[in-house]
Amino acid sequence: VQVMPIVLAGFYAGSIEGNYTQSYFMPAFSAGSLVDYFLTKKITVSLNFTFNYMYSRESLFFFTDILLGAGYRF
């Protein structure tokens, strides 16, 4: 659960740094776009949400893109 604020901070820093991550991976970096992404992926928000999503196969590249695109831009 504590991972999500870090993820959001990474999104925000990446979008401030440049438009590379925005054009590469999501239309807009905001809480709304994250909610839209999760809803389109049919992901249930619960206490187990972070672990279930992080270790699911389809989210592997999602979190990799966060690290490569946003995390390294701090």
Image (tube, helix red, strand yellow):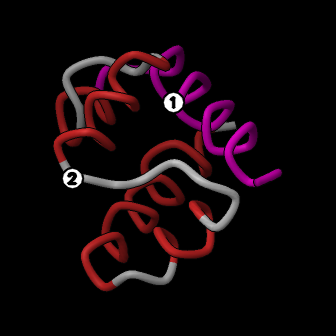
Q: Residue at x 61, y 74 (%)?
A: 51
Q: Residue at x 52, y 21 (%)?
A: 17
Q: Residue at x 57, y 61 (%)?
A: 49
Q: Which residues are magenta?
A: 1-19
CA gap, disc 1 to disc 2? 22 Å
Q: Quadrant of residue 30?
A: top left
Residue at disc 1, secondary structure: helix
Tell which tag, 1 or 2, sits nearer the viewer: 2
* Quadrant of the frame with the C terminus: top right
* Quadrant of the frame with the N terminus: bottom right
Circle on res. 14: 1
- Between 36 and 44, the one lying in front of the other is 44
Q: Is residue 61 above or below residue 70?
A: below
Please tell me how crowded label 1 is: few (under 14), some (14-19), or many (20+) other residues with Cα within 10 Å: many
Residue ID for mark 2: 41
Residue 13 falls within the magenta-colored stretch? yes
Please tell me how crowded label 2 is: few (under 14), some (14-19), or many (20+) other residues with Cα within 10 Å: few
Residue 17 falls within the magenta-colored stretch? yes
Amino acid type, label 1? Gly
Amino acid type, label 2? Lys
Q: Quadrant of residue 5?
A: top right
